[in-house]
Amino acid sequence: MDAINKLKLEDVVAGIPGGFFIYRADKEEELLFANREVWQLYNCETGEEFRALTGNSFKGMVYPEDLDEVEQSISEQIAINHKQFDYVEYRIVRKDGGIRWVEDFGHLVHNPDYGDIFFVFVYDITDKVMQKMEMQEYYLNRISEQKLLQAVIQSTIYAYREVYIVNLRDNYGRMLYPDDHNEKEIGNYKQIIERHFEEGILSRENEENIRNVLQPESIRDALMGKNSVEYQYRRRKEGGGMEWCATSVTVSERIEGIPVTVVMCIRSVEHIIKKEEQQKTILENALLSANQANEAKTVFLTNMSHDMRTPMNGIMGFCDLALRHVTEPERVRDCLMKIQESSNILLGIIDNMLDMSRLESGQMNIERSDNNLLQIMEDVYGILKDGMDQKNLTYVLDMKEVKHEWIYCDLLRMHQVLVNVVGNAVKFTEPGGSITVTVRERDSLSRGIATYEFRIKDTGIGMSPEFMKKLFLPFERERSTTVSKIQGTGLGLAVTKNIIDLMNGSIEVESEQGKGSEFIITLSFQIRKQSLNIGELLQMATDTVKVDNLVGKWVLLVEDNELNREIAKALLEEEGLIIDEADDGDVAVEMVKNSKGKYDFILMDIQMPHMNGYQAAKAIRELEDEKLANVPIIAMSANALEEDKKESLRSGMDMHLAKPIEMDKVLAALEWMMFKN
């Protein structure tokens, strides 16, 4: 401000009437100077008061609702007149809360020290503005009904292409033009219609219809008992092409109830029609999607009801038979084996249903850890071996062309994919048939990545060409006498296909009815250098972990359901384990605190009434006694979703097993805990 101070502005502007201030024209709009009259205009006694009130900026001087308009007006005036001055009127808010009107004369100059700055003279014009507003209100109240109508037309004329005032009785019309708002004499109204239609309507039929409804007698009839009518039609544009137009007719004068004078407005409604068509399309698509969703839900519930009732019927029926023949051990044993078989089928249906739900909602993720491919294939065979033995199937595994056994993959999903596909081969191959699984490693262009081809070939019943087109769709099954005897939902291959897609792989099938099928799965994995071979690993596991090692080990079984607790306890005790029971999470925490370290494992349910399994696991992990805090905890829960498993691990548990209890998995988990520790 040194350069400005040298001018001694207080002395220079002392004799100027009204207020004078200077501000910088940058983003801050900082005030550089304001004379006493400006302070007083804002009801301030000192410059400090004024700066505190306004924030020492021009923005702070203007009533907030007027600021954007004021700044835009200043910019536009300077851009147009090129003389670097402006005039604006706006409101201000005084320190006492009062609102005043001011007029502002500004001059823009460039200063080498401060850049662009405004010199502004400001005057209080509140009285003048109030008088003007009072006069406007006075004259507005004296405007006749016809003048008021014309004012409304003039204020809305820009929304219309053409506006006419028409006397229907005398067949006479006058037109208003948007360019100068002056009323133009047109003359005969029917000539107006003819001129309008010279530009062309979409079709002759359409033209005749619109021409007729716009005749004076037709308009009178249409407006009897109505204030307005509107007609829409397509019309040629001046530059070519077609557009939708609308002609609206509103009564402005009636004599004895008959419309005499009307206002006719013509406008383009192309954008409105297009928007309506888009909205209609959106609504139609939404309705179609809703109907499809309802239909899909109905199909899903119907299929699931059928497929779940089939094994449930077996379970209930064989239970009834076992109870009727309780004194016949062989008969009861046969019933129990069939109950177990039906239970496994039902569990598979539920697992597939949950997987399909996760896949469709995008909640299934692919995890990666290093695994041995030969071991994976051995696992798959182990899972399906009983079924193969029962049908006397020949099984061949060929991995001669695999160079890298160790890969990074999602072990759970690999098991799931291969068990589904090889399991289907077992299911649909007649007794005495054969299944050949060939794994080949292809050459890969990417370093550290290998591509594997899994070919699962069977001598089963095969598939028709029609069915192969929808093989991977949910709930699709071949409709044949042979297939109808085999239980399943038709979800397995749909889930498999989706998982393979998540793994960026592919699955194809070749099949011929009566001769068998061959599935070809292609997947790529990151590989790592060989460490121990699978034989060494298996031998190490065999030498280290034995079922006998579990005999005499203490297990705290945490389960709120008494029946589930009874079943689990009986099965575990048969393996030589010693069981303590807790019916809630808080009870389990107290038992661990007072256990003196006797528990070797905790089997933890998740959903319990007072303290759930997650909370209980966290509480145990936070115990001061390190031995108690580190006891292995395995979740055993009906919460079987991927997020449930992750939450178990986040809460401090070591492993998550899904109910219903499969004792071989429970024992394997306990053995693994011993081996790991």
Image: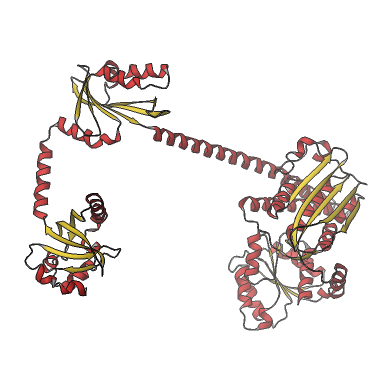
Left-right relation of 145 to 564:
left
Q: In percent of the image, x 75 and y 55: which residue is there?
A: 523
Residue 618 screen position, x and y as percent:
61, 73
Asked whether, in this view, residue 236 is left or right of residue 307, the answer is left
Image quadrant where one finds the N terminus? bottom left
Residue 615 appearing in the image: yes
State whether residue 306 is above or below residue 58.
above
Q: How many marks?
A: 0
Q: Residue at x 32, y 22 (%)?
A: 196
Q: Quadrant of residue 174?
A: top left
* Residue 387 in view: no
Residue 469 on image: x %, y %: 74, 38
In the depicted structure, whether residue 510 falls above or below residue 32? above
Q: Position of residue 76 (x, y in %)?
A: 25, 51
Q: Residue furthest front?
A: 112
Q: Quadrant of the C terminus?
A: bottom right
When asked about the image quadrant of residue 539, the answer is bottom right
Coloring scheme of the render? Answer: secondary structure
Quick check: 356 above or below 578?
Answer: above
Between residue 436 and residue 342, name the one nearer to us.
Answer: 436
Quarter assignment of residue 668? bottom right
Residue placed most toward the observer, 106 or 677: 106
Place of residue 106 in the rendered image (x, y in percent of width and height, measured from the top left): 18, 58
